[in-house]
Image (cartoon, rainbow, N blue to C red):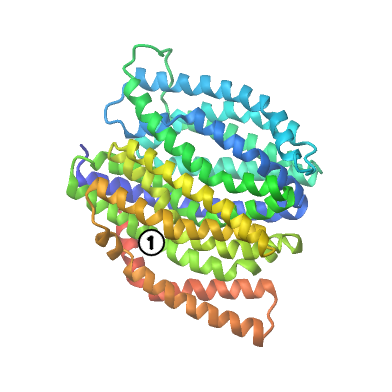
C-alpha cells in the first residue's frame, strides 16, 4: 500500500500537469470547432452523429473494461497485461468487421423516415478502421494511468488532438466535407497510439492462455455492463432525434450536447484517471480513502456548479459567436442541457468510486436502472416537445430533469454507502461553492440585462463581458475554495 504522503504528492504532481493540459485541450477544441462549424455546416455533423453511437458501442466492446482492470488490480504480472493486450487487439479487429457490416443497416434504419442519408454507408465503413488504432494504444494508456503518469498521458492526448485538428481543418479547407472529420479521427487515434508506445516502455509478450487473468476479465465484464448502459444513456437521445427528426436536428442537438459536456470533460477526463488510480491505492486505509474521496467531490463542485449556471446564461450568444446564424437554434438547447452539468460531473466520477472499492458489480446494476429511466425520459420529452412544437427542446428538458431529479440522488446514495461515506459529508463539501455560484449567477444576469436592454451590445461583446464578469465574481465569492484547491493541488508537495 502506498503511504498517504506519497499518494498526496503523486496527486499534486498529476493534477498540475493534467489540469494545464486539459484546459489547453479545450481551447484547441473550441478553436478547431469554430473553423469546422463554419466551413462544414450542419449536414456533415448530422451524418457523423448517426455513425457515432455505433462507433462508441464497438469501442466499449473493444475495451471490455480491461483497461480499468489494469489500473485497479493491485498485483499485475507482465503475462496478464500481455493477455489483456492481445484480447483488445482481437476485439479491435473483430469490431472493425462488425461495424463495416452494419453500414447497410444504418442506411436502412435512418432512411426509413425518408431522411437524406447519402454517404452514410461509406462513412460508416471508413470509420470502422479506427477500432484497430483504438485497441493498439489501450493497454499502454492504462499502464500510464496505473503508474500515475497522468500528466504525461494528458499531454500526449493534447498533442494528438492538436495534430487531428490541423489535419481536419486542412481537409475541410480543401473541400473534403464530412471526410475532413474522418481524417481528424484517424490522425488523433494513430498519433495517440504512437505517443503512448513511445512513452510507456512495456511491450507485450505472446501470452494469452494460463496467465491467471480470468478474474481481470470478470471484473472487466462488470465494468463493460456499466459502460454499455451509460453508452445507452449517452446515445439513445441522439438515435431518437436522428431517426425521428433527421440529420439537421441531430446536428443541432448532438453538438449542443457535446458543447455542454466540454466543461464536464475538462474536469472529468483527467479526474477519473486520477481518482481510480489514487483511490485504488488507498482502498485499504479507510480514513485516507474518505479524505481523498471528499476532496475529489469538493473539487468537482468547485468547477461544475459555476459551469452549469454560467453556460445556461451565455448559451445563446455563445452559439451565435461560435457557429454563426446556421447554429443559432442550438443556443436554447444548450441552456436547458446546462442544468445537467450540476450533477454530470459527480455521476461520471461514481464509476471510479465503485471500481476503486472493487464493487463494479453494483455499478453495473445501477447503470441498468439509470439507462431505463433516461430512455423513458427521452421518449416522453420528445412526445411532449412535439405537442409544444419544440421536439428537440423537449428531449433536452427530459434529459436534464431526469438526471438532476431522478437519477442522481439514489446513485449518489448507493456509491457513498458502498464506501462508507455519509451524504451529509458530501453536501458539506459543496456549501461554499453553491453560495458563490448563486451570487455569481445573479450578478451575471444583471450584467446581461444592462448589456442587452440598455446598451444593445453585439453578441461577441456580450459573451466576452459576461464571461469576464462571471470569472471575476466567482473568484471573489469562492476565494476560500480556490485557495484550498491551490494549496492541495498546486503546492510542490516537498
Dot 1: what SS? Answer: helix
Of residues 321 and 62, the one nearer the viewer is 62
Image coords of residue 477 (percent x, y): 39, 76
Image coords of residue 21 (percent x, y): 48, 50
Image coords of residue 236 (percent x, y): 57, 45
Residue 353 visible at all: yes
- Left or right: residue 256 compared with residue 436: right
Quadrant for residue 112, please give it.
top right
Q: Residue at x 63, y 75 (%)?
A: 462
Q: Residue at x 18, y 46 (%)?
A: 286
Of residues 284 and 78, the one nearer the viewer is 284
Of residues 211 and 162, the one nearer the viewer is 211
Q: Badge 1: few (under 14), some or many (20 or more) residues near its Cα, within 10 Å? A: many
The quarter of the image holding the N terminus is: top left
- Left or right: residue 346 compared with residue 377: left
In the rendered view, would you say 424 is above or below 49? Answer: below
Residue most extreme to the bottom: 454
In the rendered view, would you say 229 is above or below 217? Answer: below
Image coords of residue 432 (percent x, y): 33, 70
Name the residue carrying label 1.
301
- Left or right: residue 95 compared with residue 150: right
Residue 198 visible at all: no
The total of numbered circles placed on residues is: 1
Q: Residue at x 57, y 74 (%)?
A: 466
Amino acid at each position: 500500500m502506498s503511504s498517504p504522503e506519497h499518494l498526496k504528492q503523486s496527486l499534486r504532481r498529476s493534477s498540475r500537469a493534467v489540469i494545464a493540459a486539459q484546459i489547453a485541450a479545450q481551447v484547441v477544441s473550441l478553436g478547431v470547432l469554430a473553423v469546422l462549424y463554419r466551413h462544414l455546416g450542419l449536414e456533415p455533423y448530422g451524418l457523423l452523429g448517426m455513425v457515432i453511437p455505433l462507433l462508441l458501442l464497438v469501442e466499449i466492446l473493444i475495451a471490455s473494461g480491461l483497461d480499468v482492470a489494469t489500473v485497479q488490480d493491485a498485483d499485475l504480472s507482465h503475462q496478464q497485461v500481455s493477455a489483456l493486450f492481445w484480447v483488445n487487439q482481437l476485439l479491435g479487429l473483430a469490431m472493425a468487421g462488425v461495424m463495416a457490416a452494419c453500414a447497410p443497416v444504418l442506411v436502412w434504419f435512418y432512411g426509413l423516415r425518408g431522411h437524406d442519408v447519402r454517404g452514410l454507408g461509406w462513412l460508416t465503413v471508413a470509420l470502422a478502421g479506427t477500432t484497430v488504432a483504438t485497441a493498439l494504444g489501450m493497454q499502454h494508456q492504462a499502464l500510464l494511468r496505473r503508474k500515475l503518469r497522468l500528466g504525461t498521458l494528458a499531454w500526449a492526448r493534447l498533442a494528438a488532438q492538436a495534430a487531428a485538428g490541423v489535419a481536419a481543418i486542412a481537409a475541410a479547407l480543401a473541400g473534403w466535407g464530412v471526410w475532413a472529420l474522418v481524417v481528424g479521427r484517424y490522425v488523433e487515434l494513430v498519433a495517440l497510439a504512437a505517443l503512448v508506445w513511445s512513452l510507456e516502455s512495456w511491450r507485450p509478450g505472446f501470452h494469452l492462455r494460463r496467465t491467471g487473468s480470468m478474474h481481470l476479465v470478470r471484473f472487466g465484464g462488470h465494468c463493460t455492463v456499466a459502460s454499455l448502459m451509460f453508452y445507452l444513456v449517452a446515445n439513445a437521445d441522439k438515435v431518437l432525434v436522428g431517426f425521428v427528426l433527421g440529420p439537421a436536428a441531430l446536428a443541432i442537438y448532438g453538438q449542443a450536447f457535446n458543447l455542454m459536456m466540454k466543461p464536464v470533460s475538462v474536469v472529468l477526463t483527467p479526474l477519473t484517471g486520477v481518482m481510480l488510480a489514487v483511490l485504488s491505492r488507498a482502498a485499504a486505509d479507510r480514513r485516507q480513502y474518505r479524505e481523498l474521496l471528499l476532496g475529489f467531490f469538493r473539487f468537482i463542485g468547485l468547477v461544475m456548479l459555476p459551469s452549469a449556471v454560467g453556460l445556461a446564461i451565455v448559451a445563446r450568444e455563445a452559439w451565435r459567436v461560435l457557429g454563426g446564424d446556421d447554429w443559432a437554434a442550438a443556443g436554447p438547447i444548450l441552456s436547458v442541457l446546462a442544468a445537467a452539468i450540476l450533477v454530470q460531473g459527480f455521476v461520471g466520477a461514481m464509476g471510479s468510486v465503485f471500481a476503486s472499492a472493487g464493487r463494479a458489480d453494483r455499478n453495473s446494476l445501477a447503470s441498468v436502472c439509470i439507462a431505463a429511466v433516461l430512455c423513458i425520459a427521452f421518449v416522453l420529452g420528445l412526445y411532449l416537445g412535439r405537442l409544444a412544437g419544440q421536439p428537440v427542446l423537449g428531449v433536452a428538458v427530459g434529459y436534464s430533469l431526469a438526471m438532476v431529479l431522478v437519477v442522481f440522488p439514489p446513485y449518489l446514495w448507493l456509491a457513498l454507502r458502498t464506501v462508507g461515506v455519509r451524504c451529509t459529508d458530501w453536501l458539506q463539501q459543496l456549501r461554499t461553492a453553491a453560495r458563490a455560484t448563486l451570487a455569481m449567477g445573479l450578478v451575471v444576469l444583471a450584467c446581461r440585462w444592462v448589456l442587452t436592454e440598455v446598451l444593445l451590445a453585439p453578441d461577441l461583446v456580450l459573451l466576452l463581458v459576461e464571461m469576464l464578469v462571471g470569472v471575476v465574481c466567482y473568484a471573489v465569492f469562492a476565494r476560500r475554495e480556490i485557495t484550498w484547491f491551490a494549496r492541495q493541488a498546486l503546492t510542490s508537495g516537498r
